[in-house]
Amino acid sequence: MRKSAIIHIMQTAAEKAAYTLVRDFGDLEKLQVSHKGFRNFVTSADRHTEERIFRELSPARPEFSFICEESGFTERENKETVWIVDPIDGTSNFMRGIPYFAINVALREKNTITAGITLDPMRGECYWAEIGQGAFVERNRLRVSGREEIREAVVATRAPIAVDEKLIHAGVILRKTGSIALDMAYLAAGKYDAVIAYGANLWDIASGIVIVKEAGGFVETREEKDGYEVVASSSKKILDQLIKYTRAIEN
């Protein structure tokens, strides 16, 4: 499958930013770290990565607006077409020297995510998708596992303990990895059967939504006061079962 101009622009921007990010990962003791919020930390690498992607995307489509994790909303001529950028999804992993993090870039047009890439800098793998064109890692087509039964399904979670306990009782194999973006990419690749995340931000999940759907998977998001609740899976049957479990705990 030949990549479109939009996918090429996003991947090129992410790969240029990733070069410095990988270098910083190998030199963590020199990073300047400051506290941000309850869960997350911002590193100098985080800011520099976002700035590099912003600089690369801006001249390619100067009329497009931006939503970025660090700098927020930047309004341009076209307010309905927006780049969504997460410079490091999995910041805590990055800071502790765990090589499981990603760069996300997505494109939203009139409230629909139409294209997205998730770049794994440490493995050099770029997961990408565009509406109606399928999902790929580089030039290899992605397909979800298609598993129908929840028992023994492998599920990546960022969920409350009560939800995890319910899933374990149902026979689910849990994984907690620290990067929603890579979890969703792995779901699209058939490595996981589902992903559950609470308190996710738009930039965490935007690229994953289109990648999972184009790989044949299912995604449901619900916006809450502390972020998005996301349930994604390889089949509608598992999706419905997982939603039933999460809703039962919440009620």
Image (cartoon, rainbow, N blue to C red):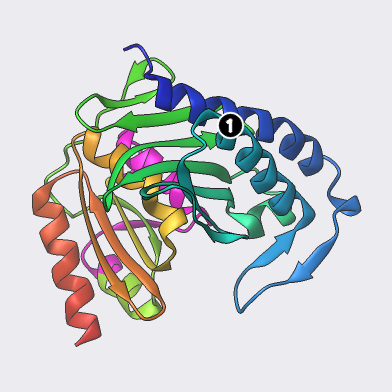
Q: Which image quarter: residue 224?
A: bottom left
Residue at (72% x, 30% y) in the render = 19
Q: Pick whichever, 145 or 128, lies toward us.
A: 128
Above or below, comparing residue 59 to residue 72 in the picture? above
Residue 169 counted in the magenta span: yes
Q: Pick whichever, 181 or 173, lies toward us.
A: 181
Is residue 123 in view? no
Callout 1 amino acid: Pro
Residue at (64% x, 56% y) in the render = 91
Q: Which region shows up in magenta?
A: 167-192
Q: Which image quarter: residue 144?
A: top left
Q: Residue furthest front?
A: 77
Residue at the spot of label 1: 59
Q: Pick whichever, 147 or 56, lies toward us.
A: 56
Q: Is residue 184 left or right of residue 237?
A: right
The N terminus, quarter of image = top left
Q: Is residue 21 left or right of residue 153?
A: right
Is residue 197 in view? yes
Above or below, comparing residue 159 to residue 150 in the picture? below
| Secondary structure of the residue carrying numbered label 1 | helix
Q: Position of residue 128 (x, y in %)?
A: 39, 30
Q: Position of residue 158 (x, y in %)?
A: 42, 65
